[in-house]
Amino acid sequence: MAAAAVDSAMEVVPALAEEAAPEAAGLSCLVNLPGEVLEYILCSGSLTAADIGRVSSTCRRLRELCQSSGKVWKEQFRVRWPSLMKHYSPTDYVNWLEEYKVRQKAGLEARKIVASFSKRFFSEHVPCNGFSDIENLEGPEIFFEDELVCILNMEGRKALTWKYYAKKILYYLRQQKILNNLKAFLQQPDDYESYLEGAVYIDQYCNPLSDISLKDIQAQIDSIVELVCKTLRGINSRHPSLAFKAGESSMIMEIELQSQVLDAMNYVLYDQLKFKGNRMDYYNALNLYMHQVLIRRTGIPISMSLLYLTIARQLGVPLEPVNFPSHFLLRWCQGAEGASLDIFDYIYIDAFGKGKQLTVKECEYLIGQHVTAALYGVVNVKKVLQRMVGNLLSLGKREGIDQSYQLLRDSLDLYLAMYPDQVQLLLLQARLYFHLGIWPEKSFCLVLKVLDILQHIQTLDPGQHGAVGYLVQHTLEHIERKKEEVGVEVKLRSHEKHRDVCYSIGLIMKHKRYGYNCVIYGWDPTCMMGHEWIRNMNVHSLPHGHHQPFYNVLVEDGSCRYAAQENLEYNVEPQEISHPDVGRYFSEFTGTHYIPNAELEIRYPEDLESVYETVQNIYSAKKEDVE
């Protein structure tokens, strides 16, 4: 009977939503239903927010059921934006109708800004002040971020340009928030020893689009601790560590009891869970990200040591980090508490080497050199993080394929957050932005900052003035060139000087010599590179040399290349090109080719028609042959 009443009422609601009049047919039937049945109907998911608004205006009873802080509007909010519900406590009073309006407004603002980015920044990288309008937005930042995530999660292979800029904006917003958190963390007193928290901030900053939190990583470590306790119970059922509660920081002083914990840890980590040092792929940034260390169960000495240290301390073993050269270690005190200790009163633990315990001599043997006693000393959180970021910085300088140098940019940001007066790194950051074409604000700001620092060190290193002067000069020259720039260059295929151009933007191609797949995003009637590039790339050895069309292509390995026409051919099995900049130039992948976005089409207005003809001739003919 109740089910029948619900079904009957469900048929009445749309009519009410359409007419919104008290005398609409079925109103009395609806309002006479029990409150819980009415609420069930209104929360069923078949009504939009506009429907709820209209229904609530029909009579007092429905208006009371649809009150702004009630279940109906909460359900509307939850169904529309489910990922936001984790930010609300069940005990909080929330005006759900107001939250709905604010979130909807934030979504419209986000889409407006994302839509503007392509037109504003198509010809250059987004400058440092390009996000200023985002920083000045009203309303909760989580609402704005949620809309960006919604854009990124749009299904299909459309809206590629929207996704491209939504990703950039989200990347920036999250990094700014994480960097502020890291700076606040670094202000903690020296005795604040949350090494894991600092490592997670580094992980988050380098992976801002991933869902990484200290809470989740700690939960994974807690599960490892539980396994260690299970093993420890088999060794000593009365071990004091087994009585520790979550969050306790008690330390065990007896060496024998500490040894039992370490034995149990080594068994669980290296034998049961198969954690190991990554010797095969040592120079991989993933080895430094704590969430990846836990997923892949491998890392390098510093990341493996932080995991080992965190587990040991939770179980009462007071291990300490040692910034040993070439191989990060932990030390375990063997001397009596309060005694005067030297480096020989410690055992050194190699977490990278399956928890092996080393003497001083064995430590030196490990790295193949004698070191001073000072290098066996304990280091604070900031020094540990400095070493982690220094490793990332070294890896960033080795980047070859990723031409955006994202890892190098991220690690420079992190290092300068900890040590803002590092002149060499400031200069490197300025040069990097010059190289990437992020003009002119950020580089100029960096140059001015370096100039301020150089006032204090000019007597020590006067040669730096030349580097800074070079950057300032070229910044000012670029500003002047920007003032003189005219409209975009438009290339018409029908023009006589373009008669030899065979391929069009958006086509999926294959390189005849190197075999890579790529998509064309620009072309020139002849090679436009300088003589040095032509010589270095041995262009003169080609049958047609540099007097032939050349194409700008996005390659599947993430690189951008400039290829001669004679080296390219149609890809008879076209596929998506997984290049990070595809969305900068194209709005959609059709399955056979890419469709240029509005900005690229302005520059090549006749190419799209040529693409359609090519696709029809190449792929339709192939389909007929297969049939």
Image (cartoon, rainbow, N blue to C red):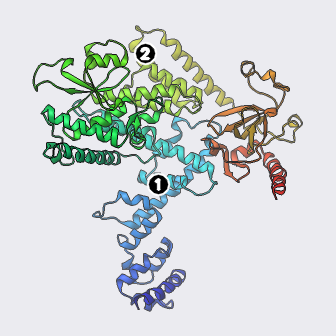
Mark 2 vs 1, N-terminal side: 1
- Give coordinates of residue 337: x percent, y percent: 11, 27
Rendered residue at 59%/36% (across/down): 125
403 vs 231, nearest the viewer: 231
- Is residue 528 at all visible to an observer of this figure? yes
Q: Nearer the viewer, residue 159 or 590?
A: 590
Residue at mark 2 to residue at mark 1: CA–CA distance: 43 Å
Location of mark 2 (residue): 454
In percent of the image, x 41 and y 67: which residue is there? 97
Circle 2: is it few (<14), some (14-19), or many (20+) Cα within 10 Å? some
Which residue carries the number 1 mark? 146
> Which image quarter: residue 325?
top left
Does residue 423 lie above or below 90 as drawn?
Answer: above
Badge 2 amino acid:
Leu
In this image, 412 relative to 584: left or right?
left
Quadrant in which the N terminus appears = bottom left
Which residue is found at the position 41% from the left and 53% from the top? 140
